[in-house]
Image: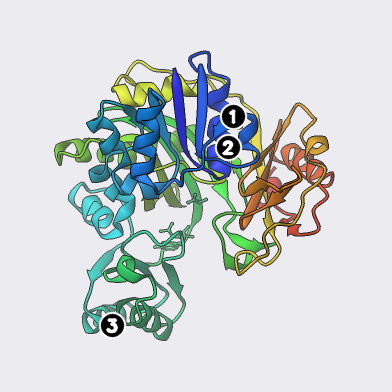
Amino acid sequence: MKVLVVGGGGREHALCWAIAGSPLVTKLYCAPGNAGIAQDAECVAIAAEDVDGIIRFVQDNDIEFVVIGPEAPLVAGLSDKLLDIGIKSFGPSAAAAVMEGSKGFMKDFCARHEIPTAAYGRFSDIAAAKTFIAKQGAPIVVKADGLAAGKGVIIAETIDQANAAVDDMLAGGAFGEAGAEIVIEEFLGGEEASFFALCDGETALPLASAQDHKRVGDGDTGPNTGGMGAYSPAPIVTEEMVETIMETIINPTMDGMKAEGKPYKGVLYAGLMIEDGQPKLLEYNVRFGDPECQVLMMRLMSDLLTALIASADGVLKDFDLRWYYETALTVVMAANGYPGSYEKGSVIKGLEKAGEDRDITVFHAGTAFSENEKICATGGRVLAVTALGDTVAEAQTSAYKAIDKIDWPGGFCRRDIGWRAVERE
Ligand code: AMP
Ligand code: GLY
């Protein structure tokens, strides 16, 4: 089978790495890919958002299956357009991707189907939004409705901060069209975890849990990022909790989407807040997390591609996946300055040495080959150094041992990924 993976970050490197080992693959391409992905797939210079370019490539190269990594092409309808030309893909239709594409849709959907989530209101009028905030009090959360590259959520500690966020989004155009409508919701306390399920429109198969570190600095301080590290499984998501999540959140979502004529296929990534044993849904994403995908792929024993095709074909019902029991932990190395402005082009050395141990995989998130064939940094998040271990502490030690072999003065990482789980152990 000729397979194309769409995307070029750490998530897509992990997907390509897993798919490259499938006995079903005769040729693997990635658009656009990166310098690390080039070890597992042939990279083609087409942007992930270039839906027409991808369709043309698929037709010209007889691609038989497409795995769509990021949310933007999903929300833009890539999987529908592929279906129009008779090509199967992994990922939801545009109609189902609205689960991530519109936070307002997701909240109304939860209300219709009694899925536990924070109390909320939807607004496009400034005065109405501020009246709601005054009534609810602070802390309170203000969210842009549409896709905002992970930046559209403001946790307001005071009413003034919440009002300012409303002004920024509704009057100031802070997130453009994505912020022309907003959701304002109750602040939830508790512990966050991510949960992933593979869906085929009818059935959801639980995959695994993970926890990530969104803040840039040690001790979970500083500005938010796309994620500076993650580990899987999440200790808080016990087997009993998996059952609760499936029963109260994932299965009602599958049934509700089917009943509303938007059957959900692909991976459903639930961002959860867990308090007193009760999970509530913070948000849905319609794709794998980055860097959560990296830790999931390290733990997956079964053939990934077979599972992704089963999701597209609607035959997950009798499907079973096997996992390594070890913990996987990934540490992101980012370019100095991230998540603010950062430099591009600095050379990274020592990658081969870092990845030589059996329990380590160095996934690339933002790398390219320089003119003299050296690997250099091209993104904010650049590498995801991923380790397997019997405990979180062991995986953490291995990951940092590998990181210390990497010679890259232009980059940095957090030194405490997994700290909460290590403390528990
Ligand atoms: P989201 O993009 O909706 O996941 O929001 C980004 C982050 O904001 C989440 O990972 C949480 O840490 C936080 N967050 C979002 N909604 C809430 C809420 N209602 N209560 C508390 N924290 C929240
Ligand atoms: N790591 C968070 C995300 O992928 O959305």
In the shown orientation, is residue 40 left or right of residue 419? left
Q: Is residue 184 visible?
A: no
Could you say which is closer to the camera, residue 166 or residue 192? 166
Secondary element type, mark 2: helix
Q: Earlier in the sequence, mark 1 or mark 3?
A: 1
The residue under label 2 is: 13
Cα distance between the residues tagged 3 and 2: 44 Å
Of badges 1 and 3, nearer the viewer stands 1
| Disc 3 packing (10 Å; few <14; some 14–19; many ≥20) | many
Q: Is residue 369 above or below residue 178?
A: above
Which residue is depicted at the point 63% across and 64% down? Answer: 338
Q: Quadrant of ligand 1?
A: bottom left
Residue 130 bears which disc, if any? 3
Residue 17 bears which disc, if any? 1
Q: Indicate the position of residue 116 as horizontal and vertical percent values.
A: 31, 51
Q: Is residue 422 above or below residue 180?
A: above
Q: Is residue 286 visible?
A: yes
Which residue is depicted at the point 30% across and 78% down? Answer: 170
Looking at the image, do the residues carrying marks 1 and 2 touch, with CB atoms under 8 Å apart? yes
* Amino acid at circle 2: His
Residue 181 bears which disc, if any? none
| The residue carrying mark 2 has its beta carbon less than 8 Å from ligand 2 | no
Which residue is depicted at the point 29% across and 57% down? Answer: 102
Secondary element type, mark 1: helix
Could you say which is closer to the camera, residue 397 or residue 356? 356
Of badges 3 and 2, nearer the viewer stands 2
Q: Is residue 214 above or below residue 12?
A: below
| The residue carrying mark 1 has its beta carbon less than 8 Å from ligand 2 | no
Q: Indicate the position of residue 404 as horizontal and vertical percent values.
A: 83, 47
Q: Earlier in the sequence, mark 3 or mark 2?
A: 2
